[in-house]
Amino acid sequence: MSTEPTTSRTSPGTVPEEVDAVVVGAGVAGLTAARSLREQGLRVVVLEAADVPGGPVRGGDLPGLDGVRVDLGAESFAARGAAVGDLVSALGLDVVEPSGAGAWGYAAGRAYPLPRAGVLGIPAQPWSRDVRRAVGVGGALRASLDRVLPRRFTDLRTLETFARSRMGTRVTERLVAPVAAGVHSAPLDRLDVGAVAPGLREAFEREGSLARAVASLRALAPAGSAVRGIDGGMHRLVEELAAGADVRLRHEVTEIARRDPSRGPSDGGASSGSWVVRAQTPDGPLELAAPRLVVTTPALVDALGPLVGTAADLLPDPEPGADVRLVTLLLRAPELDDAPRGTGLLVAPPHRDAGRTAPPSDVEAKALTHSTAKWPWLRDRVRGAVGPGHHVVRLSYGRIGATTEPDLDRVVADASRLFGVDLHGRVLGHVVTRWNGALPPPTPAFRREVAAFVARVEAVPGLGVTGGWIAGTGLAAIVGHAQECARGLAGVE
């Protein structure tokens, strides 16, 4: 799909362009909602302020690796549920599983394999060999007490208090923290259990043990890896979704108005449609009128506030999301052929004790993905393009409160320490991808405010909201929610 914006079809003072639905935001949520609405025979326009669609799902070229596009954003999706897999198949793409190599953790200067049977790092078998290797005998003994501790010894306020109250400090800091904090770019004490681990709290109430709750959820999970990918990269999902849509890039929405049906076409000159959306484009102002509006970005919360019967400041001022930096490297390093750290490592954040933060880790990255070890399709294409002994590796930076802008020397030093291999002088090419001010962490308070906001939106005919800020982190949640949102609007007249 061309990244050139569609030419605006209206000029100031003219009648707005009338369509069946307007979708604001061309991330996966917006593109998925637009596809679902088009399947109902509706004409849909997607407005996107950026110059490329996809948000954090994007692909690109890696210097030194000609002819092979790689993921420069999200590179997998959770296997739970069928929404993403069904969508991928419907678009004619192939779902693939990662290699059988496991993931590793890194804490206190030591790397160790992460237990495979768990949920967000919480183990189902605290006394298993892989758990003992990660947390030691003492940590495994403490975690095993979970099976006999009465329910009253449980603190469900956050994921951190839940894990610590049931399984102790070692499991919380060496297993749960690197996994959950890495996935959500937020410390454990800011994560709401229901938002980041759907069904876990209910399973605990049913089983009376956190380990048994995890085991019950794992038993319901599909066979194979907990994540899946797409042959050729996750960016192909965005490209296929956008290829069939009227996506208008570099179109920044500046105003949303709701036409009062009793007043006729006086609002903005609209002759039909409940919503008028105004945007600034490279060619000047644009107005669209439609009976259906889908908003996928929290940036427009203030604009929607007066339209859903509440003050403009809908949500609390939560701690800003982390600024994420993803550095993708092409390495000439035959020492990595045997995948010495499996598919990659998750780095435990510095723990906090009595309000004081421990000394910083010797690694600034929060995660490393050994992409050519994780995805056989990528390994084969890289070997075909540049020969054996070459590897694609991704390092992720950005924790809440951190201002890290890593230079290449820092990145290579982190990769060397995590792999246990000196990689200085081995970089053939690199790309830095940036996301400033990612979504706020899903704290209990934030999720309550979002739920109340959604309830108000649902009372407004023709309006829907979706996206990661509503559905939660991960494509499995986002795709299903976007489809449901679109279905709810399809019958609007």
Image (cartoon, grey):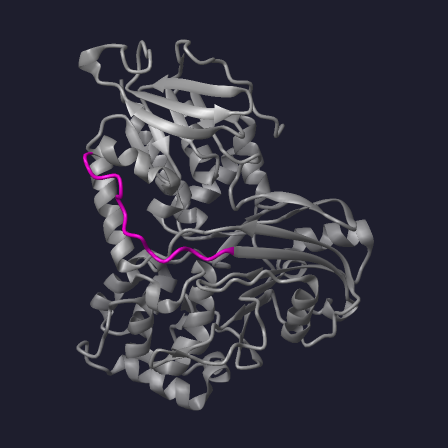
Question: Please, is residue 196 above or below residue 487 in the view?
Answer: below
Residue 152 in percent (x, y) is at 17, 77
Q: Which secondary structure type mostly characterizes the magenta part of the structure?
A: loop
In the image as oriented, which residue stretches furthest toward the bottom? 138
Question: Please, is residue 400 above or below residue 277 in the view?
Answer: below
Residue plotted at (68% across, 77% down): 420
Q: Quadrant of the C terminus?
A: top left
Report the front residue among 246 and 321: 321
Report the front residue among 436 and 395: 436
| Rendered image quadrant of residue 121 | bottom left
**Is 486 positioned to the left or the right of 361 in the image?**
left
Residue 319 on the magenta span: yes
Q: Is residue 486 shown to the viewer in this render?
A: yes
Residue 291 in percent (x, y) is at 31, 20
Residue 46 in percent (x, y) is at 46, 27
Q: Is residue 36 shown to the viewer in this render?
A: no
Residue plotted at (32% across, 24% down): 292
Residue 59 on the magenta span: no
| Rendered image quadrant of residue 412 | bottom right
Residue plotted at (38% across, 54% down): 440
Q: Quadrant of the N terminus?
A: top right
Residue 258 in percent (x, y) is at 27, 23
Task: Please state the extent of the stretch shown in magenta in the rendering.
Answer: 309-323
Report the front residue among 318 and 226: 318
| Rendered image quadrant of residue 459 | top left
